[in-house]
Image: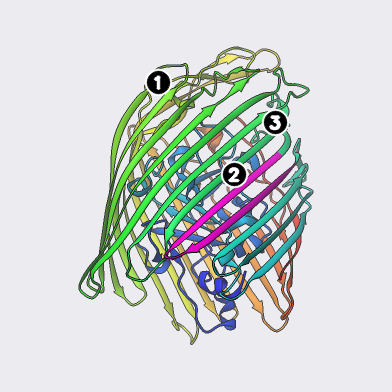
Amino acid sequence: MCLRNRTLICLAIAPASMCSNLFAAETTTVLDPMVVSATRTAVPLSSAPASISVVTQEDFDEVQAESVSQVMKKLPNVDFGGGPRVNGEIPTIRGYSGKSINLLVDGARQDWLNNTLRSPLYIDPYFVSSAEVLRGPASSLYGPGGNGGVMSFRTIAVSDFLHAGETFGAGARIGAADADRSKHINARVYGQNGVVDALAAIGYHDWGTIRQGGDLYLAPNSGHAANGLLKVGANLGNMRFDLSREEYHSDSVENSNPQANSTLAGAPAVQNFHTSREQTVLRAATADKPGGATFSATLYGTDVSVTADQGASAAVAPNTLMRTRTTGVGLQGSLPFGNVETFAHRLTAGVDYYDDHQTSTSNFAPNPVIPDGKQNAVGVFVQDEISLGKSWSLTPSVRSDHFETTPASIGSATSASHTSPKVTLAWQAAEGATLYGSYGEAFRVPTLAELYQSISGTQFFSNFRQNPNLRPETDKTAEVGAKLSRGSVFAGGDRLNLRLAIFDGKAKDLVTTAVVGTYARTFPFVGTGSIFQAQNVTNANRKGGEAEGSYALGNWQFNAAYSRVRVTDASNGNGLFSPPDKLTLQLRGRLPSNGVSVMWNTTGVAAQDYDATVSRQRPGYATHDIFVNWAPTGQKFKVNVGITNLSDKKYSTYQSSNIFAYTYQEGRSLKAALSFDI
């Protein structure tokens, strides 16, 4: 990443943005990164009145991330359950997952219409320029699915690498990790002439049996993935046009449930799975001008499919397990007016529409567990960022959505409307110090699978029962927070950053999975099977918070973050799905004379012993990682070496699935990579 972008992004803001002030020696100016997830407009991270974390491409590069989860799960109140297989990793924010959070890639929704045990997110970290996580209700701006917040990824662009006047560049990386016998190869090339710019990037990744902590092995787990990204942009007058195409294709041999521990009796059948994700985004926007009006229009299409070949132990023919096609369009405009010294506004309004189509087959026939159908929603929102003099700001927003769910052959179509308000009051108590309070409401719509999944029989591993009376899930959350960003606090040239957020939420009709019966299995499975059904918890309480801090002095920096969330059934106090307390610590240092930087990470997770679903409970654990990076001054290459899970800890992450209680995570792994940019 060029120095310009490193400087722009690398404010020392905590483990949420592991790029740091360690590079301050290279430049005299450290700029505050801009974020857009909180208001859909650009605001400085240090004063954004919301709980937000930022991750940069350098953060992924430094740990040689093979999946985005390896960095994102270090963030407070962000988790990825589902075991060590990439295809089974499920993101959560404040304990919300699935359709209760909004996943975006270049503004395009990553939607699944069903609750599956497979990951909803397929993206090569080498293609990610930055990622933002907004915690808390987001439906007033993003519509259905904003209960837990937003996880938004932006892919790399020419502007990330080239200054004005520069015309061409390229880069490549090759790396390997021994715990899963994986290799990854990536390359990119980009150029611009002042009017038109273009970027092309490719990647290849393969993997094998995973060595878990304690010298256990998770098999089968073999496969490979190939992916590509193509972007073309043009500056025409006062407008900027961007067209991007991204593809991900993988083949993997694994259990039909990728979260499964294959050593358990009755584990799901082994099959060869083919996963494909294709996305096209077209965007037009006015050029940014300080104090000027802006307008943007986005059209996107995303197609995700998973197919499976017949395995040696599978009783089904080749079939498409799932396919979800999403088409969306968004229009947004902002108009600033007023006197910034006394009373000013930035009025933003827009409309979004998306349409999800789901198809699924089993043995060339409709799949009863994952019914066919579609969901669509259209929403209109308005927001006013009001500056009340130099110290106070008030940001009200409201959105009205109309949504429909239409099953193809089971039940009848349903439709409803929902209004989601939010208001935030912020006070800049002193330079670099901000206090805020907010109240927001959010909602999410039940999926087709939650409403209509239905299968029974003793020859199945699990049975499912439909619930067409399932109601939309709503959330009302109050939050207070504080942010501090100061330099020269304890010594000249140092920098201290602190962020704190505390929230109290009330969820109504919380959608959860319940066991409603059992049955005796017959061949090919044995034992007692469970009957699952999606149900509403009438009222649930959600409380917790996040704290982040960093202190940088010279070439050294210390980062820390802590998060906690508790979700309980208001009627009986039973613990519902709630990720355990998490503490992350990081020490970073840099030796400028020889181009060496070092990083130590520690992640401590408390025991999850309060979930009423006992099979989901987990003991606590701590893991440690160390990385050494060498980028010789004046050279264009970089060497990264690291060891993850240094103590080879045997542990299992807390996750929503209670079918396979203990699928242990990856053990100690030696990683190495060589990269260069010209």
Give the residues in magenta: 224-250
**Mark on residue 653?**
2
Q: Please give left or right for residue 224 compared with residue 83 in the image.
A: right
Q: Is residue 292 above or below residue 658?
A: below
Residue 586, percent from left and from top: 58, 66
Q: Which amino acid does label 3 sit on?
A: Asn
Distance of label 2 from label 1 (alpha carbons): 32 Å
Q: Can residue 43 be seen here?
A: yes
Q: Indicate whether 130 appears above or below 273.
A: below
In front here: 184 or 213?
184
Q: In terms of sequence position, does the residue under pointer 3 or pointer 2 come before the other?
A: 3
Spot occupied by residue 628 in the image (x, y as percentages of width and height)? 71, 69
Neighbours of disc 3 within 10 Å: few (<14), some (14-19), many (20+): many
**Residue extending furthest bottom?**
492
276 sits left or right of 194 in the view = right
Q: Counting other residues with Cα less than 10 Å from the Cα at mark 2, is it few (<14), some (14-19), or many (20 or more)?
A: many
Q: Mark 1 points at which residue?
A: 468
Whether residue 245 is in magenta: the answer is yes
Report helix, strand or loop for mark 1: loop
Disc 3 element: strand
- Residue 634 horizontal side relative to residue 564, left or right: right
Q: Name the residue under label 3.
A: 255
- Residue 643 within the magenta-colored segment of the rendering: no
Q: Which amino acid does label 2 sit on?
A: Thr
Q: Who is closer to the viewer here, 333 or 71? A: 333
The answer to which of 600 and 284 lies nearer the viewer is 284
